[in-house]
Amino acid sequence: MATATTDLVRLPPALPLPKLVQSVLFLTSLQYSVVPRLSRHYGGPFTINLPVFGKTVVLHDREIVKDVYSTSFDLIERPTKVLGQAFGPGSTFSLLGKEHSERRKLVLPNFSGKRVKNYESIVEDEVLRETANWPEGQEFETLETMTRLTLNAIMRATFGERADALDELRIVIPPLITLGSLLQRMPPVVRREYGRWSPGSKLAGYRRRFDAVIDELIAEARGESSLDGRTDMLALLLQARYEDGQPISDRHIADELLTLVAAGHETTASQLAWAVERLRRHPEVMTRLAEEVDAGGSDLRQATIYEIQRVRPTIAASLRTTKTRVRLGEWVLPEDTGVMIDFQLAHESDINYTDPEAFNPDRFIGNPPPSFRWVPFGGGINRCVGASFAHMEMDITLRTLLREFRFAPTDAPDESRNFRGVAIAPGKGARAVVHRRTHTASSDRDSVSVADHSS
């Protein structure tokens, strides 16, 4: 773990470019080609200067990653400058220290394997609904479909099944997330409300509409005598209690629900789009997956999900900030220094993986992803609480797609990585050509879900 120290500061080599240029490189899609080159050039960690976060050390070495994720939040903590402000003061992303740990204890049990399994039928329903009109024999983008189905699935799992409330949230949530993500990367002056049509005012309006729906749903849920029989996240959070018996406040529940939906749908949608993009370029894997679905198995599918997340993580990195001067490996970082764990670098390291450039799901069959080398959900006390839900959603979606469709292979160049403000998605929308299968096996509905394997 990192340790507090009074030793002289010793930072990794710094990028000798103006701060504005560095910001452009690291806050756009350029980073996915530039960062690996910089890592090779410096032979390891290096230092950059970013807006909002300032001086930041970029690293991916397994031992240092382990140290960062294992260090007490008294020394290193997750910054709340961006996501916390976007989701509100009651979001897990806004809470620190003991308050964060206590909230995590309340939220995490709602994503246990047993509870996540309750949502599998919802995901399959949404996959079938959204693919019912997929064109056969002609190329189209699948990312839009994945975005709709993951949004609908997470909303039903989070808010329940009241149709009118979901209709309003389908209108409000996408622009709320997109605009909120964009504005939180802008200077404070841009985020202010200057009038009805200013970006800050529009964002505040979307948030008021969201809160109005949540307030109505909370009041309605509290009036139900059968609340303890509901399985949606809203009902579960209403029933959650801290160790002193106190409930989560309504405003904090609203912030937490927005966090679950925002963090849960676009990243998973992008990951599913990458699954289509990768598998069309590896038809031998796709054939094996279809055969496994027909036989009712799941081991290869689970391994494929892990491999897709390795080669195309939808989040670029996780950020931490030093609270005091700390020693991290051979480096000494001063207070208020950013620490960026770059997922792409970790996943493409030839120290962490044999032949890392190859798309090889077999590397994970009977061999779960290694700690601190496979990090698409982050790690430590801030690891994504919805990781098991995301795994389940990918599993059920892929199982259903492979049961219903045959995807035509392609020799087209790989689609580029495109940063969309929240997640990294295929640059051309994960284009596909599909044909409906003429027969399916009945046993695939009983195949084992990833939720059964996830902790």
Image (cartoon, grey):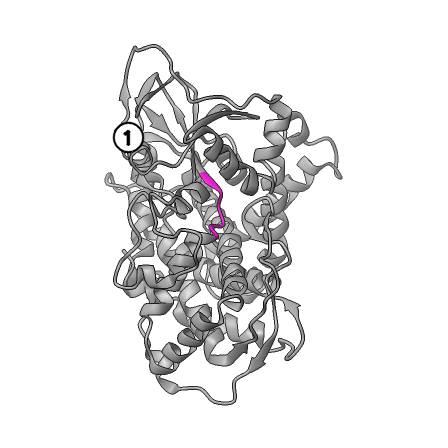
Question: Is residue 353 visible in the rendered structure shown here?
Answer: yes
Compared with residue 315, is residue 301 higher up or lower down, i.e. above or below?
below
Apparent side of residue 268 relative to residue 231 in the rendered image (left or right)? right
Up/down of 129 relative to 342, above or below: below
Q: Which residues are magenta?
A: 312-317
Neighbor class of circle 1 (other Cα within 10 Å; few <14, some 14-19, many 20+) is some
x, y (%) of residue 451?
32, 63
113 vs 402: above or below: above
Quarter of the figure that contains the C terminus:
bottom left
Look at the image and say whether residue 107 sits in the magenta stretch: no
Q: Nearer the viewer, residue 12 or 207?
A: 12
Q: Main secondary structure of the magenta part?
A: loop
Q: Which residue is mark 1?
A: 71
Can you give x and y, in whole percent of width and height, for residue 113 in the image?
29, 61
Q: Which of the 4 image quarters holds residue 24? A: top right
Question: What's the residue type where badge 1 is placed?
Answer: Thr
Q: Secondary structure at mark 1?
A: loop
- In the rendered view, tell whether residue 131 sits above or below residue 265: below
Residue 62: quarter of image: top left
**Measuring 62% from the left and 21% from the top, which residue is drawn there?**
18
Q: Quadrant of the N terminus?
A: top left
Q: Is residue 123 left or right of residue 367?
A: right
Q: How far across and down, in percent of the image, does residue 194 sit?
A: 73, 30
- Asked if residue 314 lies in the magenta stretch, the reply is yes
Answer yes or no: is residue 222 visible.
no
